[in-house]
Image (tube, rainbow, N blue to C red):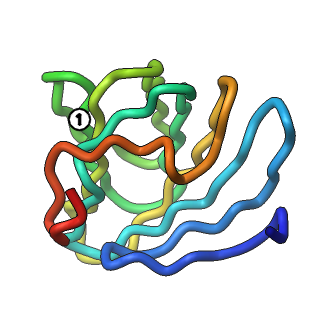
Amino acid sequence: MNPHYKEERPWGSFEVLLDDPHFKVKKICVKPGCRLSLQSHRQRNEHWVVAEGDMRIRVGESVRDYAVNEHIYIPCGEKHRMENTGTKPATVIEIQTGTYFGEDDIVRYEDDYKRV
């Protein structure tokens, strides 16, 4: 697959900016009022930086609102979710570290789009 590609999702889209054997960098754009599934990963950690908009982020049982320039670390195995609580599109830059970065390393627990 092309190391730089974009995929549409019901909640918005993601674009792979860099796909290295040791890490992956994505730009995640979330439509207003939409959220990603509650999920975890078996083989990767994620670092998120809010680049645009207002995001409500859950990590484990903790839920907090994040603004532009704030960041959060999601350790491997931890349930997490991001939600755009604003009225404009929101963007998060995601840096993945770990041993595997494929989209099939997503374990979904809840999903607004019935993908569980």
| Residue at 31% in and 56% down | 54
User: Residue 35 location in percent, x, y?
Assistant: 24, 61
Residue placed at 55% from the left, 26% from the top?
43
In which quadrant of the rendered image does the N terminus lie? bottom right
Residue 56 in the image, given as x and y percentages of width and height? 23, 46
Q: Residues within 10 Å of mark 1 (few under 14, many from 20)?
A: some
Identify which residue is drawn at 69% across, 25% down: 99
Residue 62 lies in what quarter of the image? top left
Seen in the picture, residue 95 relative to 2 is either above or below; the reply is: above
In the image: residue 17, left or right of residue 68: right
At label 1, the amino acid type is Arg
Residue 76, image x, y percentages: 46, 21
Residue bearing mark 1 = 58
How many numbered discs? 1
Place residue 53 in its image quadrant. Answer: bottom left
Query: What element does badge 1 sit on?
Result: strand
Q: Is residue 8 above or below residue 98?
A: below
Name the residue nearer the viewer: 7 or 55.
Answer: 7
